[in-house]
Image (cartoon, grey):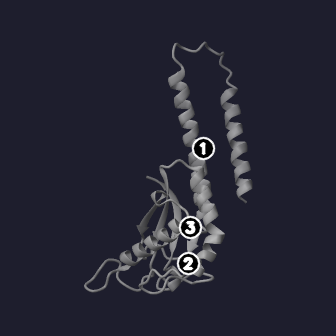
């Protein structure tokens, strides 16, 4: 599927380049200094390629989550428990793509790990209850630490707490499968 998307994007890019080059207006001699416009043109092209790559990467990352919901349904209640064996199995299937994706993009692009919770408790801290935001954050931080151990540079990872605002469709908001982290690539 990734190869098909890449081929489609490549064909679209070539078509766009051909249509831009096939102007019916007569060519004019360049003005005194064309280096600025050439650099601007290269910057725009580079930025466009980065956006295409970013869209492709984030589309693929929509399917990535930890725990994966199959081998392990979700994090334990009020925990950020990562079992080494389970995470290593997950990492074998997923970390190579995450590294490859980050290497395709400039350093200003970061992997964002988004922590999630079920809707069992309050969203924000209430008295002795720490709240879903807190548990979401510690889950995202724990997965960040585990990914750093897998060789992803810490400076290319950011974390975010989502609380119980994004439950998985088709499951109860209080189902433990909602206690997870998801991934996307964002700019600094």
Labels 1, 3: front one: 3
Q: Position of residue 169 (x, y in %)?
A: 55, 76
Q: Which residue is mark 2?
A: 67
Q: Residue at x 70, y 53 (%)?
A: 5
Res 21 → quadrant: top right
From the viewer's perspective, is 184 left or right of 163? right
Residue positioned 62% across, 55% down in the render: 56
Specify which label sits upstream in the sequence, 2 or 1: 1
Where does the image place residue 113, in percent across and percent down from the top left? 48, 66
Of residues 58 and 18, the one nearer the viewer is 58
Q: Residues within 10 Å of mark 1 (few under 14, many from 20)?
A: some
Q: Is mark 2 in CB contact (under 8 Å) with mark 1?
A: no
- Asked where in the image residue 130 lies, by quadrant, the reply is bottom left
Q: Secondary structure at mark 2?
A: loop
Marks 2 and 1 sit apart, C-alpha to C-alpha, by 32 Å
Q: Position of residue 175 (x, y in %)?
A: 50, 86
Using the image, determine if residue 115 lies above or below residue 30: below
Residue beneath disc 3? 150
Q: Pointers 1 and 3 in contact (CB under 8 A)?
A: no
Left or right: residue 65 versus residue 119 is right
Instruction: Judge whether 57 appears above or below 139 on screen.
Output: above
Residue identifier under label 1: 49
């Amino acid at each position: 599927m990734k190869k098909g998307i890449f081929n489609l994007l490549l064909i679209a890019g070539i078509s766009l380049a051909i249509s831009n080059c096939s102007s019916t207006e007569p060519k004019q001699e360049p003005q005194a200094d064309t280096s600025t416009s050439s650099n601007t043109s290269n910057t725009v092209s580079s930025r466009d390629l980065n956006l295409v790559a970013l869209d492709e990467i984030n589309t693929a990352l929509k399917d990535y989550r930890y725990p994966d919901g199959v081998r392990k349904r979700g994090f334990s209640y009020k925990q950020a428990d990562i079992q080494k064996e389970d995470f290593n199995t997950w990492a074998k299937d997923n970390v190579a793509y995450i590294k490859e994706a980050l290497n395709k993009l400039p350093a200003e692009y970061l992997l964002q790990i988004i922590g999630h919770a079920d809707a069992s408790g309050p969203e924000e801290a209430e008295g002795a209850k720490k709240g879903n935001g807190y548990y979401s954050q510690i889950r995202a931080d724990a997965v960040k630490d585990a990914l750093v151990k897998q060789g992803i540079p810490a400076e290319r990872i950011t974390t975010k707490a989502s609380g119980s605002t994004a439950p998985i469709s088709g499951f109860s908001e209080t189902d433990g499968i909602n206690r997870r982290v998801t991934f996307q690539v964002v700019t600094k």
